[in-house]
């Protein structure tokens, strides 16, 4: 029997195409917008994010977002007063608690589409925008006088010149000092890869990994600069984000 090569090739391609059915085997929908949000974790803290996406083309999405993250100093070590079991832990030497707000504009660009329902869509993402650092002074509970047992405990703003492990009872409420927040205005940028997996074509379940940079014109004083501890004005971080959302045709 003599084989007809073009016919065999056509049959093989048809079989291969059938085995590679995608989630778009139904009528493919052109989405116009999307919303997503989730948790972001980086090397020195964590935060939350929310993004609005506008589809420019089938492969390009314009992103408008907002992130709020905490930024710790690598030298932060939690300490406790060894003489009082009910004392609250504190970070010795910490001057300010830094929270960063990031209004962002950016994009999501398709690299690899889903091949099948259980597949993964791969995108690269980028974003830029202002970085607003909010440095809230740290307040501690201080024992008076500097001897155990303390006769009185008062709340004071941490001052490395007069406060040490001998008189620090523990940390005060986080909300103490909110009225003394000092802003630091800088810039923000990010680049990463987004891996989207969802059993529904209009659903968003994604993991994103990448790096971010928050840059300020001056050093942000998170810690008291003593015993080799230094502060910085450029914050490079690797991050991982877990996102959930939905795509819309309107």
Image: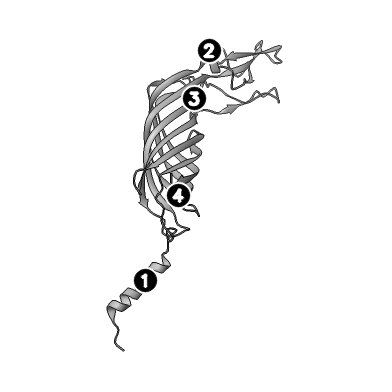
Give the image location of residue 35, x and y in percent: 47, 41
Point 47% across, 22% down: residue: 134
Identify the secondary structure beneath mark 4: strand
Q: Which mark is residue 98?
A: 3
Q: Residue 102: percent from the left, percent from the top?
A: 43, 30
Is 234 placed above or below 60 here?
above
Residue on which disc 1 sits: 14
Give whichever of discs 1 and 4 has the lower sequence position.
Answer: 1
Alpha-carbon distance for marks 2 and 3? 21 Å
Crowding at dot 4, Cα within 10 Å, few <14 / some 14-19 / many 20+, comes out as: many
In front of the other: label 3 or label 1?
1
**What is the spatial separation of the Cα atoms under label 1 and label 2, in whole angstroms?**
78 Å
Tell me if I can see residue 221 in this picture: yes
C-alpha distance separating marks 3 and 4: 31 Å
Which mark sits nearer the N-terminus, 2 or 3? 3
Q: Residues within 10 Å of mark 3 (few under 14, many from 20)?
A: many
What residue is pinned by disc 4? 196
Residue bearing mark 2: 161
Q: Residue at x 41, y 40 (%)?
A: 53
CA distance for labels 3 and 1: 59 Å
Helix, strand or loop under label 3: strand
Q: Where does the N terminus fall, quadrant-wise?
A: bottom left
- Among numbered discs 3 and 4, the one appearing first in the sequence: 3
Of badges 1 and 4, the one in the foreground is 1
Q: Earlier in the sequence, mark 4 or mark 2?
A: 2
The circle on residue 85 is: none
Residues at marks 1 and 4, CA–CA distance in whole angstroms: 28 Å
Q: How packed is label 1: few (under 14 Cα within 10 Å), some, or many (20 or more)? A: few
Q: Secondary structure at mark 1?
A: helix
């Amino acid at each position: 029997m003599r084989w007809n090569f073009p016919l065999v090739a056509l049959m093989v391609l048809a079989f291969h195409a059938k085995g590679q059915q995608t989630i778009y085997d139904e009528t493919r929908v052109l989405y116009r917008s999307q919303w997503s949000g989730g948790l972001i974790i980086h090397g020195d803290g964590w935060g939350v994010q929310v993004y609005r996406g506008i589809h420019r083309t089938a492969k390009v999405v314009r992103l408008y977002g907002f992130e709020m993250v905490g930024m710790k100093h690598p030298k932060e070590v939690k300490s406790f007063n060894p003489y009082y079991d009910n004392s609250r832990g504190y970070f010795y030497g910490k001057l300010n608690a830094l929270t960063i707000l990031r209004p962002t504009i950016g994009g999501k660009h398709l690299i690899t589409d889903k091949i099948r329902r259980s597949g993964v869509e791969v995108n690269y993402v980028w974003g830029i925008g202002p970085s607003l650092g909010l440095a809230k002074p740290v307040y501690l509970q201080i024992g008076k006088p500097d001897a155990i047992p303390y006769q009185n405990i008062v709340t004071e703003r941490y001052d490395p010149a007069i406060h040490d492990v001998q008189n620090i009872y523990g940390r005060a409420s986080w909300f103490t000092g909110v009225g003394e927040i000092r802003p630091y205005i800088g810039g923000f940028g990010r680049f990463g890869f987004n891996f989207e997996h969802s059993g529904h074509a209009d659903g968003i379940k994604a993991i994103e990994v990448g790096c971010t940079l928050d840059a300020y014109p001056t050093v942000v004083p998170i810690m008291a600069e003593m015993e080799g501890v230094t502060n910085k004005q450029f914050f490079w971080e690797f991050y991982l984000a877990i996102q959930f959302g939905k795509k819309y045709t309107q």
